[in-house]
Amino acid sequence: MKLRAPAYPLITIDPFFSVWSQADKLTDVNTTHWTDRPNVITGIATIDGKPYRFMSKEDDSIPAMKQISADCTAFSTTYVFEESGVRLTFIFTSPILMTDLYLMTRPISYLEIRKEITDHKKHDVKIKISVAEHICTNLTKSEPVECETLELGKLNSVKIGTVAQSIIPCDGDDHRISWGYFYLTTEGKTSYEVGEGDKMTYVCAEVDLKSSTLITFAYDDIESLEYFGARLKTYWNRNGALITDEIVKAHSDYKTTLKRCNEFADKMFVDAVRAGGEKYAELLELAYRQVIAAHKLALDEDGEIIFVSKECFSNGCAATVDVSYPSIPLFLLYNPELVKGMMRPIYKFTKSDAWKYDFAPHDAGQYPILNGQVYGLNRETGELMFHKQMPVEECGNMLVMEAAVALATKSTAFANEHFDILEDWVKYLIDNGRDPENQLCTDDFAGHLAHNCNLSLKAIMGIAGLGILYGMNGKKREERKYLKLARDMALDWAERASNGDGSYRLAFDKPDTFSMKYNIVWDKLFGTDLMPKTVLESEFASYRKHINAYGLPLDSRSDYTKSDWLVWTATLTADRDAFEDFVAPMWDFFNASPSRVPMTDWYFTTTGEHRHYMVGDIDKSFRNRTVQGGLFIKLLEYKGIMKYNR
């Protein structure tokens, strides 16, 4: 990868089990959780009796090894170091292969270490990995921890967890796990170092390195989510599997697993290059692990998949509809069953007595507790405030998602389970989508906006989505009715939104403004041809005059942008070169930005800094979010699996 990642993923399993290095060199900073809180893992290589750091700077009195390179693929991050005639390669792999739900949810991440001699001499090399108690506590030194060493056949393991073990004690955004147990496992020896006072407790693995060795990091959270009052396990342990058995399996199947991951990653990269060029493909490589690992997969009480996202550093909401919507291109490509899993919590809440509205909810809780919507919730009265809802936004999102899932799976079975709800939501769009009143959309960080042109496009595509579902169900009269209604709305939209120069407005009543019209991209992918191609061509051409050093701003209100919507907008063009030119400034942003955070989706197109704000002592910004799954939309278009054949 030529792209310099703003932050390098090391362990990426779920929103809690997450470790990153936010620098060019693995020794320049301590490793962190995606929230920027400490999540320190240190690595020491002792070469012929002299110690060198290769990971973190916890003890910077020890000299750092010379780092030669850093590289990322969809599943692995690889570092190469050289020192004193020895070359060490460190391969961090989180095998979250979404075509295999067992492997995707098995909470085990690998570190393979390979040794080469560069000076033809003999060298004694010892490796020590130490993991601080941050890995299993919410805040530094917030709770007492306890450790235990284990023998797992030929493997040695050490585990650490809090003494209290209060399972799922609370929800929130700036939160880490404080229950369950972390396991560090090796063929060498394991131990733990108890910290006194302010010092950390560490669990350690030590290996006499011959040619190569394998170390695993595992986390058993025991129970993962609270779901409408029920405590759920995740997929891998749904039948009572033990983490210790899974660790042994992970060591034995490493080579096979790595081969599968590499084959998937290589094909994804080649396909992405063909779809949108090498820079586009590198952005997908960086996004893949982040997108999946900002979710948790579990089975509900009926044995159905739920795939729960966390709004990372935006408010911590769980199963948010307007976070799921931009993420779906990745999952439509490789496992559309996961899109169904995103939608099930929303349907369950919609059917409850707690939901009083005739439009779709925003979310189903705050991670990891899903007992109903929290966005706009008055905590004192328990009432959901209407002005904080996103009616047109979420109805359109759910309808487009349903149509997309039906096309990807070639079946309307899932949609048919909720068809009465979908019909209600379409009624809302018909009544309110032509010219939306003053309400929020997914870009709620920009505030309320009346007469939002892009939001109206979402309503149009939601109505078309129901038409597609009717058509796939063999109800051709209803199909024609809704597709015609959507087409008539699109033609009306083109007249009312026009600036008169080939460009189209941010809001119907705001001439000489602009915005990304990303929602209409589904018209192109579905092949419904609701909007005249001349409209899309002239609108896309008009964006050129607004592009800054790091891309096109979201709209005329600010010079910040959203990476997911930028790629959706780029996909509107039929010109491959124009697509690459449109995406290249975003590649430049991630390559050069001084904001060293896990792949933010909200940044300034002029300065190359992420859009952030302070909450107490925490520098918050959109980061590690699932919406980067939206970057895969060009690849989704290239694959052609969204075409609706009437």
Image (cartoon, rainbow, N blue to C red):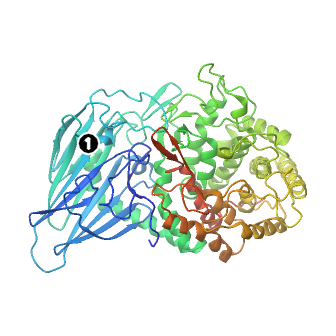
Q: Which residue is mark 1?
A: 244
What amino acid does circle 1 point to? Thr
In the picture, measured across the screen, residue 288 lies left or right of residue 361, that is left
Residue at far top of view? 381
| Residue 481 coordinates in the image, percent (x, y) | 87, 48
| Mark 1 nearby-residue class (10 Å; few <14, some 14–19, many ≥20) | some
| Residue 377 coordinates in the image, percent (x, y) | 62, 28
SS type, badge 1: helix
Q: How many marks?
A: 1
Which part of the image, by quadrant, shows the C terminus?
A: bottom right
As displayed, is residue 420 above or below residue 463?
Answer: above
Residue at horizontal 53%, vertical 48%?
621
Nearer to the camera, 595 or 467: 595
| Residue 624 coordinates in the image, percent (x, y) | 49, 51
Asked whether residue 334 appears in the rendered view, the answer is yes
Asked whether residue 98 appears in the rendered view, the answer is no
